[in-house]
Image (cartoon, rainbow, N blue to C red):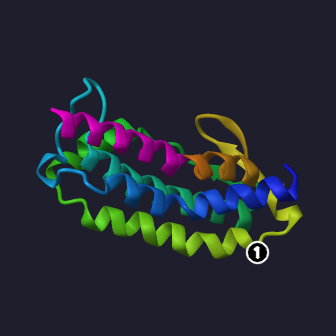
Amino acid sequence: MSPDERRALIARYAAGVRVVEQALEGFPTDRLTERPFPGKWSAREIIHHLGDSETHSALRIRKLLAEESPVIQGYDQDLYAVRFRYNERDHGAAFAAFRAARENTVPIIEAMSDAEWQRAGTHTQSGHYTAETWLRIYAAHAHGHADQLRLLRDALVKA
């Protein structure tokens, strides 16, 4: 990955909270738990997922930087949604966790050296996992969920 590509991905990662906030603008707050698309998450479930996922994400990049040959633990996001009752709980704290994890991680990744970006470990579900792999995944993660939120919002507003 070139330094320019890395800088662009870091900027995209840093913009993730703002993009999700924009996707939630105009969302009918009384419909956050509705699932207009069978088998897909509600807006509230997506927000809780972002909180939990970003908590894992923040730990992953820190393990990659601080440990030799770290093991990056995978998890079952659908099981989390059920076991942690995403659709039954207020999502305010989850959004705050998402924001805090991103805001706390951006300065770390902005300061990483070229050598640090090459650090690697093993992900329990996908194998070899580098800091650059992490960046590619999480630079896109919030944006993908913002797209889902916009689709949900549009479907619910039209309904």
Quarter residue 7 falls in: bottom right
Q: Residue furthest left?
A: 30
| Residue 21 drawn at (x, y percent) | 38, 60
Q: Is residue 140 above or below residue 65?
A: above
The magenta stretch spans residue 116: no
| Residue at image coords 37%, 52% | 23
Residue wearing tag 1: 111
Q: Main secondary structure of the magenta part?
A: helix
Q: Amino acid at mark 1?
A: Ala
Q: Is residue 15 above or below residue 28?
A: below
Looking at the image, which is closer to me, 72 or 57? 57
| Residue at image coords 46%, 62% | 17
Q: Is residue 74 above or below residue 5?
A: above
Q: The magenta stretch spans which residues?
A: 141-159
| Residue at image coords 59%, 51% | 138
| Residue 123 drawn at (x, y percent) | 64, 42
Q: Residue furthest top?
A: 38
